[in-house]
Image (tube, rainbow, N blue to C red):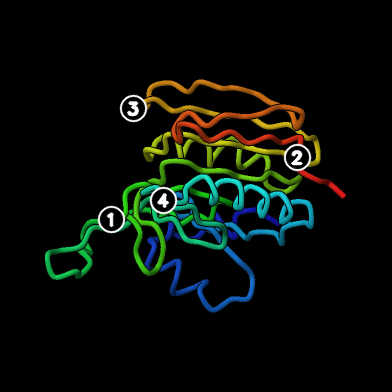
Amino acid sequence: MNEPISQKVKLLTVEEFFAIYSDKEERYELIDGIAFMMAAPSTVHQDLSMFLSIEIGNFLKGKKCKVFAAPYDIFLNESPKDKDGKLIKKKRVKGTVVQPDLIVVCDKEKIQPDGCHGAPDFVIEIASISTKDRDKSIKFHKYFSSGVKEYWIIDPEEQIGAVYIFNLEGKKAEVYPFTFDDKVKSHVLEGLEIDFAEFNFE
C-alpha cells in the first residue's frame, strides 16, 4: 500500500489521472505525475482527525478561513488552459492532486466545487506506518514548493508531531517538535492552540 502504481508508464497529467482512477473503489493521490494508492485510515487516525476538525472548525467560526477534511482534492499542478477553458495540449504538466487529512484555506477563490485549486494555507497529515515516510519526504517537499505556509505531521502511534513553518521565500523551514502532552500553537492561524492532552485514545 502507498507505493507508486507504476513508474514505468508516462507521468500523468491531472486529466489523465482522473480518467484512469476516478472510477476505482480505492483512493489514490497523484504526485508529480505518479499515482499512489492510499491505505484505509485506522480508528485512531479517524478519531484524531475528527478531534482536530472540531477544534479548528470551532476556532474558525466567523472567520474568513475554512477547514476541510479528507477526502477532499487539492490541485497543486495542473495543465494550463486557454481563455475558453480548453487545455493547452503543448504544455504538458506532471499533475499533483493530493488529499491531506486536514487543510485550512483562507483564499476563497481557491475553493471550487471539485476541491481546492492552489496551495492551502495550513496542511495537517496524520501519519501511519504506511504513510509517514511519504509525509516527511515527497509530500513535505511538494507542500514546501507549492506555497503552503504551515504543515503539521502528527504520529498518533508515537504520540509525537512536528510543526513546519515555510517562509514566504520558500528557502527554509522552521520546525517545532511536540508531544501529546503539549499545547501546540499555529503560526498561520493566530490564536489557534491545540491541547493534545485533551485527545482521548480510548
| Residue 198, numbered label | 2
Q: Nearer the viewer, mark 3 or mark 2?
A: 2
| Left or right, 197 with reference to 85 | right
- What residue is rendered at 28% in x and 55% in y? 109
Say what amino acid the circle numbered 3 marks: Leu
> Upstream in the sequence, badge 1 or badge 4?
4
Q: Nearer the viewer, mark 1 or mark 4?
A: 4
Q: Say whether marks 3 and 4 touch (CB < 8 Å).
A: no
Q: Nearer the viewer, mark 3 or mark 4?
A: 4
Say what amino acid the circle numbered 2 marks: Glu
Q: Nearer the viewer, mark 1 or mark 2?
A: 2
How much space separates mark 2 and mark 4, taking CA atoms?
A: 24 Å
Tell me the quadrant of the picture where the N terminus can be found: bottom right
SS type, badge 2: helix
Residue density around tag 4, few if under 14, some if 14–19, many if 20 or more, within 10 Å: few
Name the residue that disc number 3 marks. 168
> Upstream in the sequence, badge 3 or badge 4?
4
SS type, badge 3: loop
